[in-house]
Amino acid sequence: MTSQMPFRNKKWIKYSLTVLAAAALAALCVITARTPSTAGEGHIPLGYESALSLLPPFIAIALALLTKEVYFSLFMGILAGGLLYAHGNLELTLNTILYNEDGGFIPNIASVQNASILVFVVLLGSLVAMMNKAGGSAAFGRWVSGRIKTRVGVQLATILLGILIFVDDGFNCMTVGSVIRPVTDRHRISRAKLAYLIDATAAPICIIAPISSWAAAVTYSVPADSGINGFEMFLRTIPYNFYALGTIVMMLLIVTLKLDYGPMRLHEENAMRGDLFTTPDRPYQDADDAVPSSLGRVTDLVLPVVVLICSCIIGIVYTGGFFDGVGFIDAFANSNSAMGLVFGSLVAVIFTFFLYMCRGVISFGDFMECFPAGFRSMCAPMIILVMAWNLSGMTGLLGADAYIHDLTAATAGEIKIFLPCIIFVIAVFLAFSTGTSWGTFSILIPIVCSVFAGSDEMLTISIAACLSGAVCGDHCSPISDTTIMASAGAHSNHVNHVVTQMPYAFTCAGVCAVGYLIAGLMGYSMGNARALLSLPITLLLLAAVLFAASGLSKRRRAGKG
């Protein structure tokens, strides 16, 4: 039986959307082209700090879901942002997109933080190529296959590995994918399902891990003049982080009870028939076809990965001043995680070189060839990453952060009981639109701190709602770097990953919104202790909704069959 695509997009639909988008942008140019070719100090973009500032990411996301063409969709969103900033002047639009210091393509690449992420991605891709060439991945796959006999067991092993690598979400995505992908392929687990498991154990795990780059980001987002200890506040939010905890429970239920629904069910059914991708394209096909060495052992994969994890942790705390006398927790809070990951991955590559050369599993020439091979395998995610940063920069130039800040602050003070639910929804919306959860923290947490007293349990619940919503939006946004790297780690088509993951993410998000409504009511009227009851209520409600969605999906599939 041949596999069927989840969405049958006709060519004329893509062409029509392209023509309509181009016509709309041309009309925008003609109507608003009143700005000179250079933006002076008092330049105000069209739609600045208004709902129009969110138009570029919405264009990119909508086109990506409709056309399945990621590069085109991101470019159209970037172009729309540039045109809004320049009031339609084409020369200023081009200069803004390419060279604007606060969001242009070139400054984004030149940024130390972003360049470090790109270098880390290339080094990790090269390391994966080395482990594959040396036969370590194949040996590990044989070893695991001899001990884990079921599809459920392999998926649980993927989840466990994702939980163990909690230091950084991008590091998690790339490492888990490279290690476990050969095993999931043998057990006919779809690439879309693997991408979901990787993504769901990245940001949702990091946001509840005290020793992680995310804990540092939250710590720094709490205003210094608020009198609140940022790290202590992070720890207090963990029991109220409904989306992170709900995602973990949801994964376990879906895997152990086989409750897949929506497009994911189709991908899994096709995988059982031998088609791991469902759609015609086969991303990273060249990388998957590498011929491994027959001398590879399990240690040829395990040792480099262990060294990679340890060296990355050491690299992160090193950038935070740990070796200069700063405490371990403070070093994480002060760290530059991107630089630390580069240090750690470089150490792992050097270690792997000596390990493989001493054992003679591959030649020096084969080892060096892994660098360009790793770069080639990571070209697609790097292009998407850079374009996503460019789009985020355009959104920032249009004042989207200030718009959300003012919108939230205007209503927060009068509706404190409902604020956790409102903050969660706004955080989901903002993180989904901009593709950044850390930016969402920095916008919303100061607002919450200004509304509630430092000792109020409602403050903890509301900050947790902000973190939970930011992770949710980041988890399902097509332009999030975590989502992009999860696709890369699983070697999955990016749009397939987004389309199959969205129903799961939105199901959990809807239940969490209800949970925060309950938590707000309990926290305001019943006190601290009873507010904690909202967590088991939310998880039970999530389980009930999940069973209902899975049952409905089965009935629909049976009816079509």
Image: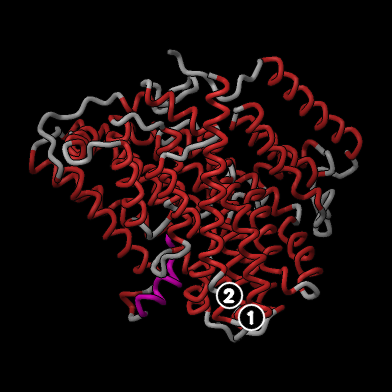
Q: Which residues are magenta?
A: 327-337
427 inside magenta stretch = no
Mark 1 touches mark 2? (CB < 8 Å) = yes
The circle on residue 526 is 1
Find residue 26 and report its horizontal and vertical position in percent. 83, 29
First in residue order: circle 1 vs circle 2: 1
Magenta residue check for 330: yes
**Residue under label 2:** 531
Residue 16 location, x and y as percent?
75, 20
Could you tell me which secondary element the residue under label 2 belongs to?
helix
Q: Main secondary structure of the magenta part?
A: helix
Measuring 30% from the left and 46% from the top, which residue is drawn there?
Answer: 157
Judge from the rendering whether residue 485 lies leftward or rightward of residue 81; answer left or right: left
Q: What numbered label is drawn on residue 115?
A: none
Asked if residue 342 is positioned above or below residue 287 in the image, the reply reads below
Q: In screen coordinates, is 162 left or right of 397? A: left
Q: In this orientation, does residue 367 appear?
A: no
Viewer-side residue, 292 vs 244 = 244
